[in-house]
Image: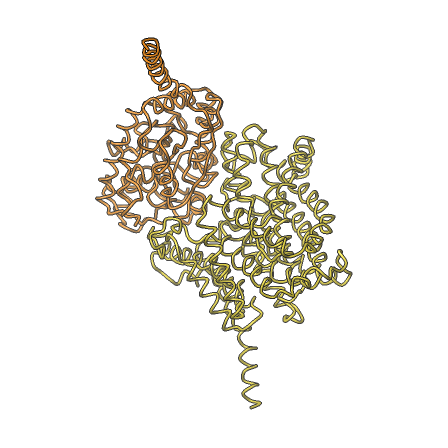
Chain colours: A yellow, B orange
Amino acid sequence: MNIFDNIMFGLGVAVNPLNLLYCFLGCVLGTLIGVLPGIGPVATIAMLLPITFNLSPIAALIMLAGIYYGAQYGGSTTSILVNIPGEASSVVTCLDGYAMAQQGRAGPALAIAAIGSFFAGTVATLLIAFFAPPLAEVAFKFSSAEYCSLIVFGLVAAVVMASGSLLKAIAVVFLGLLLGIVGTDVTSGIKRFTFSIWALSDGIEFVAVAMGMFGFAEIIRNLELKTKQEALTSHVHHLMPTRSDIKASWRPVLRGTVLGSFLGILPGGGAILSSFASYTLEKRLAKDPSRFGKGAIEGVAGPESANNAGAQMSFIPLLTLGIPPNAVMALMVGAMMIQGIIPGPQVMTERPELFWGLIASMWIGNLILVVLNLPLIGIWVRLLTVPYRLLYPAILTFCCIGVYSINNSSFDVILTACFGLVGCFFNKLDCEPAPFLLGFILGPMVEEHLRRAMLYSHGDPSVFFTRPISLVLLIAAALLLFFTIIPTVSRKRRKVFKE
Amino acid sequence: MRKILRLTVLAFFVLMVISIAAGSVFAQGFPTKPIRIIVPFVPGGPTDVFARIVAQKLSENLGQQIIIDNRGGGNAVIGTEIVAQAPPDGYTLLFNAPGPIATPDLYKSLPFDVEKDFVPITLAVTSPNILAAHPSFPANTISELIALAKAKPGQLNCAISTIGGSNHLALELFKSMAGIKMETISYKGAAPALNALLAGHVPIMFNTIGLMVPHIKAGKLKALGVTSLKRTDIFPEVPAFSEFLPGFEAASWFAVWGPAGMPKEIVTRLNNEIVKALHSPEVKKRCKDLYAEAIGNSPEEFASYVKSERTKWAKVIKDFGIRLD
């Protein structure tokens, strides 16, 4: 059975009316929860697991998968409209997407996000169909040493991402690193900075931090500047992207797709890095980097494509090896096990309808989503015209419900409020929350991989430089840092010179 | 006057009879509202899957909804604490893998007392652990492995998916009974650990059979030994560790508990119903598909099993100084 036969077979399974219905249901549900700030695919899929008992395995997986990438599409909506990232990968969209919304260009931002995501989803689906097993093998080449170097590169990118003061960006990244340490250390099992609070023993919940610093802090800021309320609702220009928008976006979309496709294969955090990496890449390549952070459409097009490609590619370790690379895929494993299917390499050969049907439905799902989301843009944008005094309590309520739904823990909601205050401070001090969040996510990861790489090599640090991929990444990080600092240094020297 | 006295005495007797009957009717009428089973792990993991399989059948039998409440975190301590503090009316139960309840000595302090705060209901499911190795690993049998470890003490790396989990304890038991030293590398769960094993970054790992079976069958991993007392049906050619180290047993087990103070009738009723669900053909088949065995024994049998497990692991934990802090 060659590839084309398989794809046809998969399409046949996917367009079966019942499976199509579940795909549609999953996509709609996914978009809805993506749009509601806070409530994410993990909580939703967990709630729907009992229903999957009574469905056929393929219908269950199609629906859950639809929820997953539907949430990716919907998540960009909240990031752009109200500056609230639903997941780690949507943080970057907040930066320029929200700025565009404030300039009345929410429509083009949403449209480019949807179109870019569709393109990336199509490419990713094709890659999975043709290259799934070899791509899974590529992921094996990444041992902890390579991950560590990749994340070091990511941390340097976090500093580059910042549009304000370089010193503040570095300070804020380190603050994020420190807060990321709170919790149980993976390697030794020792608890750090948990102050005997059991709820902190798994670390500070990321969504609580993100929603607090982006969402709550933004609401506080808007309430302070009372005049802003009218400004938000006044000018909403055309809903569709202009020709110049499309011209500026198509290359970032391509680059983002490539980046996301590659990083998405790496289990455990690859997809998170894809949107950050894409943003940094676009900023580096742009003719005028100062536009970033103030509404540059490349800052939406690239990261959105990257994170959708990354999200689709994260199915590969699940489908080819049976290893879930993130929490949502772990739920899919649970759904499969409830049906009595053990995930593993044999799924491709023993249950081809599962493998190929799921792949085909991924593309159909992306199609449904772009058809669903483009007309909805008008409705979302009209939401912005709701008076702010009605909008923000609703946002706050949904955020609290969303944060609570992650662990059924009210402690997380309190944490969100605390981080709202922290975000407030950051605004006053003109520090950016995005590098902080990156440091928060990447800090524990770099430590885990650094120590594990040392354990593998029995204490030999040269392993970071003798392994080729790791060496390349470290050199890239050093170069990136060098080229970022040099203009700042030379500017300072010119200033001194003038004086 | 006498009529009133007679009526009063009659009424008194009737009331007494009703209240006695109501006592047993209460147990008969249980459950009258949905039951909440707390699974102290995030959804999708093996404990969660087994809990849902059992709950599905139990719900059918009882005619009441059973809600699975996932309260993961703190290595199962958070969810377990919630059950310890729940009212002992039988409407809040715990479905657990061995964790703080079986090995309380791992923790410096726990927010509950494992002896006093819980009532064992039944042992639900057991699943043996297996030691699997990357195909490039030089040893092919348990004796070769022990010889290799003795030749290079501390040089051999072994993966564990959770510190304090059953695979970690299995490894420590193996090290103590075989008298060898190995370096343990821990991961955030079974998925990353399995990934590292398949990639060859670590040579060996103990874990549940269900996790490793597809890869062993595909030839991506080789099985060295099983941790049950006897050989398994799935891999009859793979020896049990107890053939080389007499008495070696380290299986994963999943069980149902309730908060202390539950009335005896409710414990008995719950036990009967859960055991009935576990012995039903659907649950048996679903567990078998996942390479586990549905057990379902009486609270007393289960209690004595727990006692023996706790004693066994307490010794290993003490000997090796394993601490979860």
The spot of residue A124 in percent (x, y) is 63, 48
Q: Is residue A288 above or below residue B77?
A: below
Locate residue B166 relative to residue A231 in the image: left or right: left
Q: Camera-side residue: A103 or B98? A: A103
Question: Residue B258 lies in what quarter of the image?
Answer: top left
Q: Nearer the viewer, residue A76 or A208?
A: A208
- The single residue placed furthest to the bottom in the displayed view is A499
Question: Looking at this view, is B164 or B26 the one in front?
Answer: B26
Please name the residue shown 46% across and 20% down the image.
B61
Quick one: A122 or B158, which is closer to the camera? A122
- Residue found 38% across the figure and 43% down from its top: B78
* Residue A473 in view of the camera: no
Residue A488: image x %, image y %? Answer: 55, 77
Quadrant hosting residue A33: top right
| In this rendering, position of residue A220 left or right of residue B231 | right
**Relative vertical location of residue A58 with respect to residue A277 in this rendering, above or below:** above
Residue B250, position in %: x, y?
A: 31, 34
Q: Position of residue A19 (x, y in %)?
A: 65, 33
Residue A182 falls left or right of residue A166:
left
How many numbered marks appear?
Answer: 0
Residue at 40% from the left image edge and 24% from the top image edge: B274
A87 over B102 or under it: above or below: below
Whether residue A320 is visible: yes
Query: Would you identify the image quadrant in which residue B261 lies?
Result: top left
Quadrant of the rendering where the N terminus of chain B is positioned: top left
